[in-house]
Image: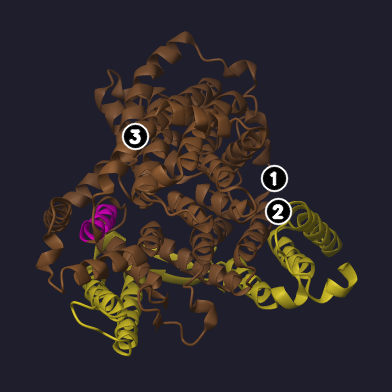
Chain colours: A yellow, B brown
Amino acid sequence: MKNAAELTTTMRRGEIIAAVVLLLLSAGIIAGAWEMPVGSAAQPGAAIFPLGLGFLLGLISLGLLLRAVRLRGEEAAEPVQIGHPQIWLTLFILFIVGLVFDWLGYLISATLLMAVLLRSYSTLRWHVVLLAAVGASIVSWLIFSQLLDASLPMGVLEPLLR
Amino acid sequence: MMSYLIDGFALALRPDNLLYCFIGVFWGTIVGVLPGLGPLAGLTLLLPLTFHLEPASAIIMLAGIFYGAMYGGSTTSILLRMPGEAASVITCLDGHEMAKQGRAGPALVVVAIGSFVGGTVSVVGLMMFAPLLAKLMLQVGPAAEFALMVFALLVMSLIGTGHVLKTVTMILLGLVIGTIGLDPITGYPRYTFGLIELSDGISFVGMALGLFGVSEILLNLENIANVKPIRPTLKSLMPRWQDLRDAAPSIGRGSAIGFLFGFIPGISHVISTFVSYAVEKRISKHPEQFGHGAIAGVAGPETANNATTGSAMIPLLVLGIPAIPATAILLSALMIHGLQPGPELISKHPEIFWGLIASMYIGNFMLLILNLPLVGLFVNLLRVPYAYLAPTVLLFCIIGIYSVNTNASDILIMVGFGLLGYLLRKFKFDAAPLLLAVVLGERIEVSLRRALIISDGSYIGLLQGGASKIFVSAVVLLVVLQFVAVLLGYRKKMFSDV
C-alpha cells in the first residue's frame, strides 16, 4: 500500500530528471573550472581535468536525456516508489546526529539515534526502547572507546566522565 | 620466492596475526550472511579499528573480511533464498532448491570445499603472477599508466550490468568527485567553496559507507521480508560420495573462471558466478536439472566468486588499481598505513605482500574448518529482527566513520551519499563504478598531466613507448567495440542471455 510520504514516479520520468540534474551539474563543473588556472598543454593547470570532465559529463547527460525521452514500453512505465516514511526519518535522525555529535557527545547522540530508530522500526514500548537505547550506547561505547581505543567524543558529558 | 613465503608464514602464524586473521574471516562471514551488509560495509566498519595495528596485521584482518564475506553470502542463499551479497545471487537458484529437498547440508559442504579450493587456487595464482607483473610494471611511464587506468574504467563500463550510458555517467561523476580538494600538483583549491573540511577531498570511507552501507539499509526498510530459514542438523551436513564426484569438475572449472575474471575491473566477482553457472549448464549432460537443485549449479559459481578474491588482489597490489569496490577499501587502508600499492610494494614491503599471501592460505583453511560447525550460529543470527539489526548497523557506521578522522562532518557526508546511493539504485544506476573512479581519479589526472609535461604538451607524445601504444590501442579498440555493441544491441542481448 502506498504511503502518503512516498513519491511515485516512472523510470522514464526519473531518468529525465536525473539527466537534467546532471546537465546542470556539468554546467556548474565547467563554470567552477573556468575560475581555475588553465595553464598550457605543456604545463597543464588545475582547470584542465575538471573542465574536460565537465564537458564529457554534459555530453553523456544529453545522451541520457535523449535515451530517456525516447524510452517506451514496459521499461519507461516501470513505477518507482521513493521514500518510505521510515527512510526519511532515518536520514533525518542521522543528519541531526551528524550535526550534534561533537557537542552532545557519543553517549547522548547514540541513545537518541537508537531510541528514535528502535521506536520507529519496532513495536516496542517507549520505556523498553529507552532502556535498550541507553544500554546499546553504553555497551558500544565501552567496547569501541574503552576496549578498542576508537576516538569518540564525550561532548557535554566530558566533565562527568573525566 | 620460497624464502619470502616462509617469512610470510612466520609473520602470518604469529599469535596476534592468527587472531586478526580469525577476526577478519569470522566478521567477514557474518557480514556476508547478514542481508544488508556486504564485504564493503564490513570492511569500512572495521577499517578505523585497524589504525592502531601494524600495517601487516591490518591488511591480514581486512583481507580476511573480504574473502570471508564471499563465503558467508552463500549460506543465506541456500537456507533462505536470500543472497547475503551480490556474488551469491545465482546460488539461490539451485542451492535453495537443494535445501527444500532436504539437502541443505551437502550444498553447504560443497560450498565450503569449493570456496576453499577456489580461494587457494587464486592465492597460488596471486603468488605466481603478482611479482612477475610488478617487474614489468616498473618499466611503465606516466603515459602508459594513464592509458592503463582509462582502460580499466572502460572495461568497467563494458561489463557493468546497467545501461552503458548510466555506467559511464557514474564513472564521470566519480572522477569529478575525485577532483574536489587541493589540486594534487599545484595545490590550487578546487570546488572547496572555502571550506577547510573539503581541502582533503570528500571522505572516501564516508562515501563508501553511505553508498553501500546506509543505502542498503534504506532499501531494506522498504521490504523487511518475513522469511523462515531452513535449519540443517549437523548429521544432515554430510554429502554423499556422488555429490562430491558431481561437484569436483565444477569446482575445477569455477576456480579457473573466477581467477581469470578477478583481473577485470568492475563487478567481476558477480559476473564470474553468472559465467560459471552458464558454463556448467551448457556442458552438463542434464541441463534440465539446473534450477531444480543441481549441485554443479552451486559448486561452480560459489567456487568462482571465491577464486576472484586472489586475482582481484593482483591489480590492487601490483598496479594500485582496485578491481572491485571491496579492494578499493583495501587500497585506502594500505594508504592510511603509509603504503603505496603499485609495482614497488612487493620489493619495498615484501613482509606485507608475503604475509598477506600466507594469511590467505591460513584464512581459507580457517573458513573450511570453522564455518560448517558454525552454520547453526549464522542461521540464528538471521533470527535477529531487522528492526533491531538496522539501528545497530547504523550506529556502527557512525562509530566507524567518526573514528577515521574524528570529524563529525564525515557523518553528514555519509548521510548524503546514503541518500544518493538509495536514489541511484532506485533508478538502476550502479554505484560501484563511481566509487572506483573516485579512487582512480587523482592518479589518472596526475599521470596525464605528467605525461603531457614530459611530452612538452604533445598529445601524440603520449603514444611514445611500447606499453603506451598497447594500452592506448586497447582503449581505442574498447571505445569502438562499445559503440558497435550498443548500436547492434549486442550488450542487451548478452545480459538478457545470462
Label 3 neighbour load within 10 Å: few <14, some 14-19, many 20+: many
Instruction: For mark 2, name the chain.
Output: B
Q: Is residue B41 placed above or below B111 in the rendered structure? A: below
Q: Which region of the structure is painted magenta?
A: B143-156
List x then y, in percent, for residue B360.
50, 33
Q: Secondary structure at mark 3?
A: helix
Q: Quadrant of the C terminus of chain B?
A: top left
Q: Residue B388's mark?
A: 2
Q: Residue B384's mark?
A: 1
- Whether residues under marks 2 and 1 lie with C-beta atoms below 8 angstroms apart, the answer is yes
The secondary structure that most of the magenta stretch takes on is helix
Amino acid found under the numbered disc labelled 2: Tyr
**Mark 3 / mark 2, whichever is N-terminal:** 3
List x then y, in percent, for residue B384.
69, 45
List x then y, in percent, for residue B63.
51, 42
Q: Furthest residue to the right?
A: A160
Image point (42%, 25%), residue name: B2
Query: Along the horizontal axis of the image, is B291 left or right of B145?
Result: right
Is B148 colored magenta in this rendering? yes
Q: Dividing the picture into quarters, in which one does residue B291 lie?
A: top left
**Mark 1 / mark 3, whichever is N-terminal:** 3
Amino acid found under the numbered disc labelled 3: Phe
Query: Along the horizontal axis of the image, is B454 left or right of B183?
Result: left
- Whether residues under marks 1 and 3 lie with C-beta atoms below 8 angstroms apart, the answer is no
Q: Furthest residue to the bottom?
A: A35
Q: Residue B259's mark?
A: 3
Q: Nearer the viewer, residue B300 or B46?
A: B46
Is A44 colored magenta in this rendering? no
Q: Is residue B273 placed above or below B151 in the rendered structure? A: above
Q: Nearer the viewer, residue A27 or A128?
A: A27
Q: Quadrant of the N terminus of chain B?
A: top left
